Image (spheres, helix red, strand yellow):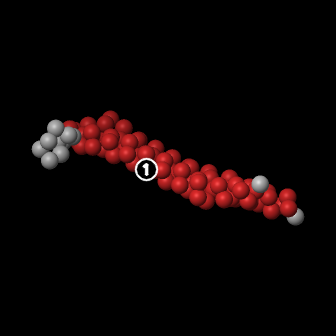
Amino acid sequence: MVSSNFSHNFKRLIIINNLVSYTLSSVILLLYFTFILIIGFYPQLFQIYLFNNSITIGIAFGLFIIIFSIFLTLIYVLISNVYLDKLKDQNE
């Protein structure tokens, strides 16, 4: 019985870890591919200046992708430390 419970908890840990990591990775990949597709097919969009300043939409969107990637990394670390580590400790 202990082995079955261990196996069930371990499978649950793997499934949740994969779900979280694949979801967050997919969001980042979607943003990067959107950025590249806009550069490839409609580069004029990234040449528009924001607020009559020297910053263009392309610079702002690129900076947004970097900051959003860091934010999603923080989210993953929090989920991993708070929830997934508890599941891992149950397996030990």
Give the total number of marks visible in the rendering. Answer: 1
**Residue 44 found in image quarter:** top left
Q: Residue furthest right?
A: 1
Q: In x, y percent, where is residue 6? A: 79, 58
In this picture, residue 70 sits left or right of residue 45: right
Residue at left offset 27%, top offset 43%: 60
Which residue is at the front of the view, 85 or 24?
Answer: 85
**What secondary structure is found at the residue carrying circle 1?**
helix
Local packing at callout 1 (Cα closer than 10 Å; few below 14, some 14-19, many 20+) is few
Q: Is residue 83 above or below residue 41?
A: below
In this picture, residue 87 sits left or right of residue 59: right
**Residue 90 found in image quarter:** bottom right
Which image quarter is the C terminus in?
bottom right
Residue at left offset 80%, top offset 62%: 5
Which residue is at the front of the view, 30 or 64?
Answer: 64
Q: In x, y percent, where is residue 19? A: 59, 54
Residue at left offset 53%, top offset 51%: 76
Q: Amino acid at mark 1?
A: Phe
Which residue is at the front of the view, 35 or 50?
Answer: 50
Q: In x, y percent, where is residue 21? A: 56, 49
In this picture, residue 38 sits left or right of residue 44: right
Residue at the spot of label 1: 71
Mark yes or no: residue 72 visible: yes
Residue at left offset 14%, top offset 42%: 53
Q: Residue furthest top?
A: 40
Mark yes or no: residue 23 visible: no
Q: Residue furthest bottom?
A: 1
Which image quarter is the N terminus in?
bottom right
